[in-house]
Image (spheres, rainbow, N blue to C red):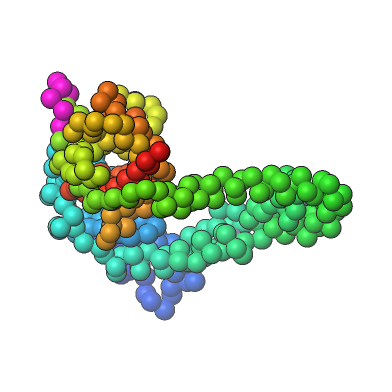
Amino acid sequence: MSDQLLDNPSSSTEQYKEPPSKKSKTSIATSSVKLEERLNHILSCTVCLDLPTSACMQCCHGHLMCVGCYHHLLADARLKDEQATCPSCRVDITRGSCIRNLAVEKAISELPVECSTCGGTFSRSNIVNHEVQQCSERVVACRFKQLGCNWSGPAHESDTHTSACNQHAKSPNELLKCLGTINSQQEKQAAVLRNIVELLSCDLISYMEVQLRPYRTEDFVTKLFYESNRFHLLGQTWTLKAYVSAVERHPSNPTVSAERKLTCQLFLKSKVSEPLEVDILLLRAPYDDVHIKPKPFYTRFTSEVTETSVQSIETDYTNRLLGLKVINLRLFMFQHKR
Ligand SMILES: [Zn+2]
Ligand SMILES: [Zn+2]
Ligand SMILES: [Zn+2]
Ligand SMILES: [Zn+2]
């Protein structure tokens, strides 16, 4: 398809017939528009058909895909227990066989694109900066938003609104109330970190690099799950399991949904003679760049309670984790002796 567009015989004969001296400005302009359109088509991702906006990967035969679709292909293959293949040529897609295409990334960043709010034309490398910081039509909130003003509108109307906005005429008591709301929001975020700092002073801390390997269930339609080898922490034997679930649409069949979630569960494999109270924290492993939001969870293990409840692994990179051969996590245990 793209080859046809490049070597369109009719357009090349037209160009041949027209003497260069008679080429009008408008015909140059229209042909350059056509070139952009053709480049858009040639450089677009073979999976989502959009132009890659960040990294651009290619199969070993040169077919392009945006990095999001690349991770999605690998994750899909993992979930279906299949080999990922290039949608264009069916060659195997692996982490080792695909490379980035920097020339395409740079070429795309030079292509013009229209601002969705003001309609001006900018290069793709400048459009984000323009839309977020410079466009006079971009939607901004009132300067006094945190004091309770809900106004939002185009940036060029912001000054007019600010001078008319009555939020800055608030009484000290009203201002205190606003500050209280802001404080309580920040307090929630700080509480998580404070909790972790407090855990650092508990009786006993132990941690372990845990490697989760993919397995399939023995159901008729096999499902993907992850399990670690047995490991020893705090004098006990443990295994960690992880499950994949879809956030919406098909909770029972994650392979058809793009929105996936990883959950995990820790199992105590040895017998405890007295209750073992621990907080458990999962973080990314060293040399791994997949960020996991810290969220400690508490469990009191006894001879009857030998597993934690199922906990979500909070990350924005679930597909990337699923595309990996193994998932590496660092597991902390904080033991309380009360
Ligand atoms: Zn794509
Ligand atoms: Zn290919
Ligand atoms: Zn604009
Ligand atoms: Zn306002």
Is residue 277 visible to us here?
yes
Q: With respect to residue 325, does 103 lie above or below?
A: below
Front-lying residue, 232 or 337: 337
Q: With respect to residue 68, does 78 lie above or below?
A: above
Q: Residue 104's image quarter? A: bottom left
At a point 38% along the width and 27% down the height, the residue shown is 249
The x, y position of residue 269, in whole percent, is: 19, 33
At a point 66% along the width and 60% down the height, the residue shown is 136
At a point 51% along the width and 62% down the height, the residue shown is 127
The x, y position of residue 331, in whole percent, is: 29, 47
Q: Residue 253's image quarter? A: top left
Quarter of the image where ligand 3 sits:
bottom right
At a point 46% along the width and 53% down the height, the residue shown is 197
Is residue 241 visible to us here?
no
- Residue at the extreme top: 220
Judge whether residue 78 is colored magenta: no
Q: Is residue 338 rendered to the left or right of residue 81? A: right
Judge whether residue 217 is colored magenta: yes
The x, y position of residue 31, in whole percent, is: 41, 64
Front-lying residue, 194 or 73: 194
Q: With respect to residue 314, does 6 lie above or below?
A: below
The residue range painted magenta reads 216-221
